[in-house]
Amino acid sequence: MKSAILSLVLTSFITLAQSQSFSWISSTEGNTWEQSQIKLQKNAQSEPDLEVNGDNPIVTFKAWGTCFNEKGWDALNMLPKDQQDKILAQLFSPGGDLKFSIGRVSMNANDYARDWYSCDEVDGDFTLKYFNINRDKTTLIPFIRSAQAQNPDMTFWISPWSPPSWMKINHYYSVVSNKDFNELDPKKDFLLYEGSEKKSDHVFPQKLAVNDYLIQDPRYLETYANYFCKFISAYQEEGIPVTMVMFQNEAWSYTPYPGCAWTPEGIIRFNTEYLAPALKQQHPDVSLYLGTINTNRYDFVDKVLSDSRMPQTIQGVGFQWEGGQLVSRLREKYPNYKYVQTESECGWGSFDWGAAEHTFQLINHYLGNGCEEYTFWNAILYDDGVSGWGWKQNALIRVDSKSGTATYTPEYYAVKHYCNYITPGSKIVASKNDKRDKLSIMLAKNPEGRYIVLAGNFKDESRDITVKMNGKYLNVNLPAHSLNSFSMK
């Protein structure tokens, strides 16, 4: 008995001693993933910048993920096979750098497809006789299977950018015309606003669509709901489990690439009366989330969520871009939903340290405001990261198409700082994200109960910070423009 008590005391002492020490990983431009050690102190060097307050976490984190796009598949295939395998392991293996375990898939083409396509472009095919995923079998599905080889337990969720063109009021895949990137008749742009008034510069979009671009005839609405179900079934037959659906990517981006505008009435009608019932009947295990929300017009989104039928229709809400500004407010009013981030902001093809700092702050914002999942956009692109519609975007890995070599961008390391340490089941305890002060700090506990601190200093000079944990203090000087992870040993 005495031996058992002595062993318990010794184990507690060792754990306590170890808990005073943290591994410190720091990254600055041109000098990433520098490792050192730091110890907790009994006294604070200054007023704590962040501290543990109570036992209730903000959220229990669930998973990291990325999108599967044709342009990404093309980039990957420009590399030698051994390099492809290495990158896939770093992205998707449970023991890799980023540990992505969820995948987002576009139903029909998105803006990082090679060009426009849908699974059924046969006008008037209300029985979906000609529905197929043949295009996906040559691009997205091989890409997904390569990821599944690294992590067979991956799950997937889907959203469309545009319905088949024949289901839309303008009979075209985009919302607006652009002489350089599509062939839509400019006269049809009138359908979007019909002379509606522009609002404040502080909201996005400044003008809201007055028409639903999906034809609101019941026959079209029912067919489109069934279209979702056929897509899920087709992917299941390929061994790809779809566990979540969102009705539309960025319903408030009126784009020259694949897109679809919606009104609040149309969103409510389609989700409550058609999509949710179809999923319940054909795929009852698939969750329906409202998303992806990319507008900061609170009244517009609140109008949808406040409909009395929505609690029986959706299980959660997904946010990206300007929609992220609403997460805290909506979560406070609608606490029973789950909240997820759906697409990390992709920038403008700079591939620079500024993009890394922006992403580091963005992750803090979403997790610190209660999002339990975080999905990145393009994991890998080639050259300037340009889409088929002319938009240059960032990626975590950049391929040179001429040399067939890959570069890990600064943003990759920003993501690695989080993904390496905030694993599924980690509890987000506290966060601070001060853009004016150029400081980002997050405090989390991993599933083993050990503290994790993520801290970014975006000033031109170094700075001291203090984080308080259970009466002990992490006092540290953060280098200028640095990204940092501290993990309890």
Image (spheres, rainbow, N blue to C red):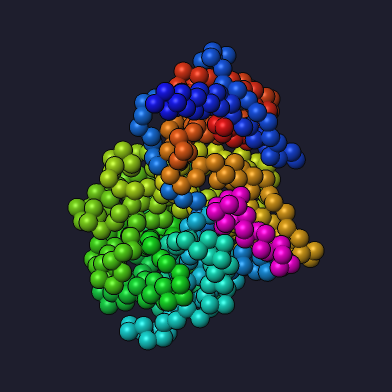
Q: Is residue 429 left or right of residue 229?
A: right
Q: Is residue 186 visible?
A: no
Instruction: Give the residue at x 28% y 66%.
Output: 284
Q: Is residue 166 visible?
A: yes
47 in relation to 253, above or below: above
Instruction: Give the residue at x 50% y 19%.
Output: 472
Residue 252 percent location from the top left of the image: 42, 56
Q: Which image quadrant: the N terminus?
A: top left
Q: Nearer the viewer, residue 168 or 399?
A: 399
Which residue, as the protein is rendered here, is positioned at the far bottom? 129
Q: Which residues are magenta?
A: 78-99
Asked whether 85 falls inside the magenta stretch, the response is yes
Q: Nearer the viewer, residue 424 or 164?
A: 424
Instruction: Give the residue at x 32% y 75%.
Output: 226
Q: Nearer the viewer, residue 79 or 197?
A: 79
Tell me the quarter of the picture where residue 213 sits: bottom left
Residue 250 percent location from the top left of the image: 44, 57
Instruction: Give the residue at x 60% y 52%.
Output: 96
Residue 372 percent location from the top left of the image: 41, 46
